[in-house]
Image (spheres, rainbow, N blue to C red):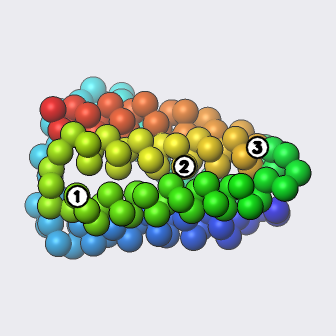
Amino acid sequence: MGWFNFYGLIFIAIIMIPNVIFAIKCKDGFENKKVNKTIEVLEQVGRFGCFGFMIINVPYTHFGWLFEGALPFYLITDGALVAAYCLIWAICFKKNSLFRALALSIIPSVIFLFSGIMLTSVPLTVAAVIFAPCHIYISYINQK
């Protein structure tokens, strides 16, 4: 895989579909409780880093697949996680619950971390390690 990850672009695009639908249908969104500003900033840095590094493989920081034949494993695993994410959005769209909040924060965190490891992408893995705990914590606090 070269500098552009077409599969990563597809995964990000699919993940964004339910979020865009939610933003259109629920213009008021949800109550965002106050969280430590540093955690909010780190979450956003991690989020945009994950989005970018899922699509762009930065030269000399991306070392190819973790093992030979990893591409099908990567596609099946990320595909299943993306499908689970969309399914939970569809089932729990109008239900505001701790399950929904945690599932919809843990699944993308796992997608980004798994992808970073499988692609041996240092920036994606670092961004995922920053994003995951912050995003899960903020989701938990907002639902609590």
How many marks overall?
Answer: 3
Amino acid type at mark 2: Ile
User: Which residue is disc 1 drawn over?
Assistant: 92
Q: Residue at x 84, y 56 (%)?
A: 69
**Sequence-earlier tag: 1 or 3:** 1
Residue type at the position of mark 1: Cys
**Which mark is first along the chain, 2 or 3?**
2
Residue 47 in picture, x, y percent from top left: 46, 47
Furthest-right residue in view?
Answer: 68
Marks 1, 2: nearer the viewer: 1
The local crowd at label 1, few if under 14, some if 14 to 19, many if 20 or more residues have their Cα within 10 Å, is: some
Residue 55: tell me if it is visible. no
Label pair 1/2, CB-CB below 8 angstroms: no
* Element on which disc 2 rests: helix
Q: Which-is-in-front pick, marks 1 and 3?
A: 1
* Residue 111 numbered mark, or none: 2
Quarter of the view holding residue 120: top right
Instruction: Report the residue marked by disc 3.
Output: 120
Secondary structure under the numbered disc 3 in the rendered image? loop
Residue 58 versus residue 14: which sits nearer the camera? 14
Q: CA distance from mark 1 to mark 2?
A: 20 Å
**Which residue is drawn at the image coordinates 15% and 66% (left, top)?**
26
Q: What residue is rendered at 55% in x and 33% in y?
A: 129
Residue 79, numbered circle: none
Q: Is residue 61 above or below residue 29?
A: above
